């Protein structure tokens, strides 16, 4: 499990985690709040539709509908933002951490009951696709301070443990760096 400063004590127990990293383009912001806002408030249209469908259907099976504060910043440091919520079925936290050459989105989940386990089994199928899409979009669309977007050859093999096609983002620039079921 990837543990960052803010994630280390964010939940009393972690049942599942993952982390994805994307190369931070030259001139892209280093402020993790800017990245967090782009990831969770400027998602691709199909992701917004998927979340709207979730909102419309989960109440029918007794799962709490997400609140507007679900992806609000809970706390932050200079290089990391922590988001998340606590519901009856599960709790989750998301860390958006900026480093010199990459941005990492890490997720941890604590399941509270059978309903949470059933719900998360479905969410788990979509989660990697959504994470890759929002990271890729943010990497492509965030404004650059540098007028030239240089294509540097960074050493990413040391971080690569998964596949990474990211909807028109160069797959060499997006990597799953951790995933696990815990207990």
Image: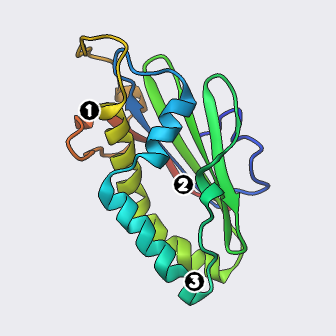
* Residues at marks 1 and 2, CA–CA distance in whole angstroms: 22 Å
The quadrant of the picture occupied by the N terminus is top right
Mark 1, residue position: 172
Asked whether the beta carbons under mark 2 and mark 3 sit within 8 Å of each other, the answer is no
Label 2 neighbourhood size at 10 Å, few (<14), some (14-19), many (20+)? Answer: some
Q: Is residue 144 left or right of residue 65?
A: left
Above or below 23: residue 147? above
Above or below 96: residue 49? below
User: Nearer the viewer's eye, disc 1 or disc 3?
Assistant: 3
- The residue at the point 34 percent across, 22 percent down is 25
Asked whether the beta carbons under mark 1 and mark 3 sit within 8 Å of each other, the answer is no
Residue 59 lies, in percent from the top left, at: 57, 83
Mark 2, residue position: 180
Q: Dot 2: what SS?
A: strand
- The residue at the point 45 percent across, 21 percent down is 29
Residue 157 lies, in percent from the top left, at: 34, 28
The image quadrant that residue 7 belongs to is top right
Looking at the rendered structure, which numbered label has been put on residue 59? 3
* Residues at marks 1 and 3, CA–CA distance in whole angstroms: 39 Å
Sequence-first disc among 1 and 2: 1
Q: Nearer the viewer, residue 26 or 6?
A: 26
Above or below 3: residue 18? below
User: Nearer the viewer's eye, disc 2 or disc 3?
Assistant: 3
Residue 129 lies, in percent from the top left, at: 35, 56
């Amino acid at each position: 499990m990837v543990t960052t400063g803010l994630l280390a004590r964010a939940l009393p127990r972690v049942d599942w985690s993952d982390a994805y990293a994307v190369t931070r383009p030259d001139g892209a912001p280093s402020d993790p709040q800017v990245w967090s806002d782009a990831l969770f408030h400027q998602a691709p249209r199909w992701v917004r539709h998927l979340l709207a469908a979730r909102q419309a259907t989960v109440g029918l099976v007794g799962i709490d509908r997400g609140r507007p504060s679900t992806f609000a910043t809970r706390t932050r440091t200079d290089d990391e933002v922590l988001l998340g919520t606590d519901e009856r079925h599960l709790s989750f936290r998301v860390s958006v951490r900026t480093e010199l050459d990459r941005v990492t989105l890490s997720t941890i989940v604590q399941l509270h009951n059978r309903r949470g386990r059933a719900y998360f089994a479905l969410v788990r199928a979509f989660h990697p696709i959504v994470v890759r899409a929002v990271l890729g979009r943010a990497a492509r669309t965030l404004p650059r301070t540098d007028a030239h977007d240089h294509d540097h050859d960074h050493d990413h093999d040391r971080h690569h443990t998964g596949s990474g096609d990211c909807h028109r983002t160069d797959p060499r620039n997006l990597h799953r760096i951790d995933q696990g079921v815990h207990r």
